[in-house]
Amino acid sequence: MDPSEMRYLEDDDTPMMKTIKGATMGLVSGTIWGTIVATWHDVPRVEKSVALPGLIRTIKMMGNHGVTFAAIGGVYIGVEQLVQHYRMKRDFINGAVGGFVAGSTILGFKDGMEDCLREMDMRLIGRNIKNAIAAGAALAVTSAIIDAGGQTTRMDTGKEYYPYTTKKRSAVEG
């Protein structure tokens, strides 16, 4: 490959670009998941003042799930890249720290703070901290297991597989 072309490939692997890609993938997958979840719920009642209530609810669910998944992906990859840069190592601990931070900040506090604001009861914060730690630990353990497992389901045997045969056939076989 030409060295001038390598420059373009190297720019794609910066920590900022990885974070943007993680957030974008989270947004896309969350939006798709929000669409699926919206189909499982009953369609709201049609009223005169609200046009297309089912479509509005679906778009809200798509946006809510999309933003949540984008935040999780962006925080996870961003923290993982920061820890990797700080430690100067690339191992499963980076992903576990990123998973804990993403799980505790996004998943743990998201629902908990909504409960506190809705109920106007600050005593619920203690329960929210427990939820945040549990969500962070769940994402950290999941990330560590995946990273420690080699991130693949196939073993590389060194063989190359082609969609065609490389062996020459004789005219009698063909």
Image (cartoon, rainbow, N blue to C red):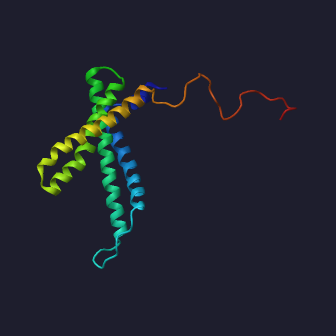
Q: Identify the image quadrant of the C terminus.
A: top right
Q: Give the residue drawn at x 43%, y 24%.
A: 3
- The percent coordinates of residue 115 (x first, y second) are 20, 53
- At 33% from the left and 46% from the top, the residue drawn is 69
Q: Is residue 47 above or below residue 59?
A: below
Asked if one can make out residue 48 in the rendered structure from this viewpoint, the answer is yes
Q: Residue lying farthest right?
A: 172
Residue 12 % position (x, y): 37, 33
Q: Position of residue 16 (x, y in %)?
A: 30, 35
State whether residue 16 appears in this view. no
Q: Nearer the viewer, residue 120 or 16?
A: 120
Q: Quadrant of residue 91?
A: top left
Question: From the viewer's perspective, is residue 165 above or below residue 48?
Answer: above
Q: Nearer the viewer, residue 143 or 120?
A: 120
Q: Tell me if residue 79 comes above or below residue 46 in the rendering.
A: above
In depth, the one of 97 and 12 nearer the eye is 97
Left or right for 64, reference 117: right
* Residue at x 55%, y 26% (from the top left corner): 155
Residue 74, position in %: x, y?
30, 40
Left or right of 16? Residue 25 is: right
Residue drawn where x is 32% and y is 27% of the image: 94
Q: Nearer the viewer, residue 172 or 48?
A: 48
Residue at the outermost bottom position: 48
Q: Quadrant of residue 19?
A: top left
Could you tell me how many numbered marks the image carries? Answer: 0
